[in-house]
Amino acid sequence: AYGLNGTAAAMEASVAPAQSEINPALPNVVILATGGTIAGSSDSNTDTTGYKAGALGVETLINAVPEMKGLANVSGEQVANVGSPDVDNTILLQLAKRINELLARDDVNGIVITHGTDTLEETAYFLNLVVKSDKPVVVVGAMRPATAISADGPFNLYNAVKVASAPESKGKGVMIMLNDRIGSARYITKTNTTAVDTFKSVEQGYLGAVVGDKVLFYNEPTRKHTTQSVFDVSGLTELPQVDILYEYQNNGRYLYDAAVAAGAKGIVVAGSGNGSLSSASSEGAEDAGKKGVVIARSTRVGSGTVSSSSSDLADNFVSTDSLNPQKARILLMLALTKTNDAAQIQSYFNEY
Ligand SMILES: NC(=O)C[C@H](N)C(=O)O
């Protein structure tokens, strides 16, 4: 796949094409690498589960797909090199600020972010809310490590650069590119632990696809994103603590009490069904609400919209529309940088 020959990959902080290699007729695309399976490596080429994620540097990823030179002048920067369960608020803020810096430049036409798939949708949705440009931003990952037979990373990366280079990709919000499909960061979620066709959206579908040399769009994201978004990370050095609590039978209120004691400013509930909480959870959540903690009712179901309830706002509760718990957490963190008012936060969940 990446032609490693078993050697440890060089990990340069940044790589740029030599002056003589720059084609002024092509767009300029910057790849920001954060790790994940797309940069994963194993001693065995049939190992698709026990490999090390975030093992290879951005230069190795770029050198493995020289065909990208026919699409764009590609440069790369290493932002992090971790498995995506370890992508945290610090990395999110760093990544978003760097993207905004780069996209403000006339000589940058698009951005590709390489990322682990486990939390890819969280980073993509965060960027969808805070990138201040309509230039294409594409988040890409892989399900098989770089060393595997039929590794999916190189073609996914090639397609991501293709989408980031395409004029028709402008203004679509942050996109997710895997398995030939172009998805909106707002709609797409990981649905399978190991399969290469893991990124799906049951309700809203894909924005489009890459087919042969064509970038084809069929849908537009209708919720506010990027240039339409009020959220701004430029003055932020941290994000408010928002935790997620899962609903299940026979639960107690102690997890709510623990979250509040640990400093949560918001709690997303992965509710049962249409955002339901047990009586015990409701007590814990209502007491948290009285202390100013905003409670966002999402669902553990995996698809569908949580409807609002007439008693929500009085209890400092909001409902999360069709955002799953992990994306609801992203929006609630950003919402809490603007206001603590539940009604205003509910309007964000209705619009974004
Ligand atoms: N396929 C992947 O990228 C999974 C990996 N554990 C990650 O999220 O970093």
Image: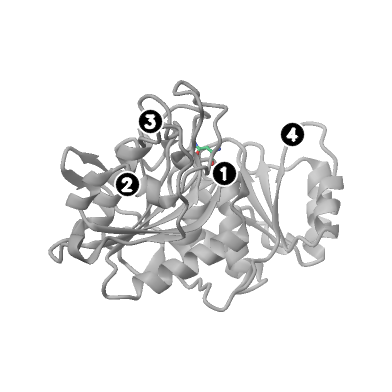
Per the image, label 4 sits on a secondary structure element best described as loop
Instruction: Identify the mark at residue 231; answer none if there is no mark.
Output: none
Mark 3–mark 4 distance (CA, rounded to whole Å): 38 Å
Above or below residue 157? Residue 242 is below
Residue closest to the far left: 25
Mark 4–mark 2 distance (CA, rounded to whole Å): 48 Å
> Looking at the image, which residue is at 56% across and 79% down?
235
Q: Which residue is mark 3?
A: 151
Which dot, 2 or 1, sits closer to the camera?
A: 2
Q: Is residue 35 visible?
A: yes
In the rendered structure, the answer to whether residue 82 lies left or right of residue 225 reads: right
Mark 2–mark 1 distance (CA, rounded to whole Å): 21 Å
**Where is residue 237 shown, x and y percent of the image?**
62, 73
Q: Is residue 207 visible?
A: no
Mark 4–mark 1 distance (CA, rounded to whole Å): 28 Å
- Earlier along the polypeptide chain: callout 3 or callout 1? 1
Above or below residue 83? Residue 220 is below
Instruction: Identify the mark at residue 248; answer none if there is no mark.
Output: 4
- Is ligand 1 less than 8 Å from the beta carbon at label 4? no
The N terminus is located in which quarter? top left
- Earlier along the polypeptide chain: callout 4 or callout 2? 2
Decide: few, some or many residues near mark 2? Use Cα within 10 Å; few <14, some 14-19, many ≥20: few
Q: Which residue is mark 2?
A: 63
Residue closest to the far top: 46
Determine which quarter of the picture holds residue 236.
Answer: bottom right
Which dot, 4 or 1, sits closer to the camera?
A: 1
Which dot, 3 or 4, sits closer to the camera?
A: 3
**Where is residue 347 shown, x and y percent of the image?**
54, 65
Which dot, 4 or 2, sits closer to the camera?
A: 2
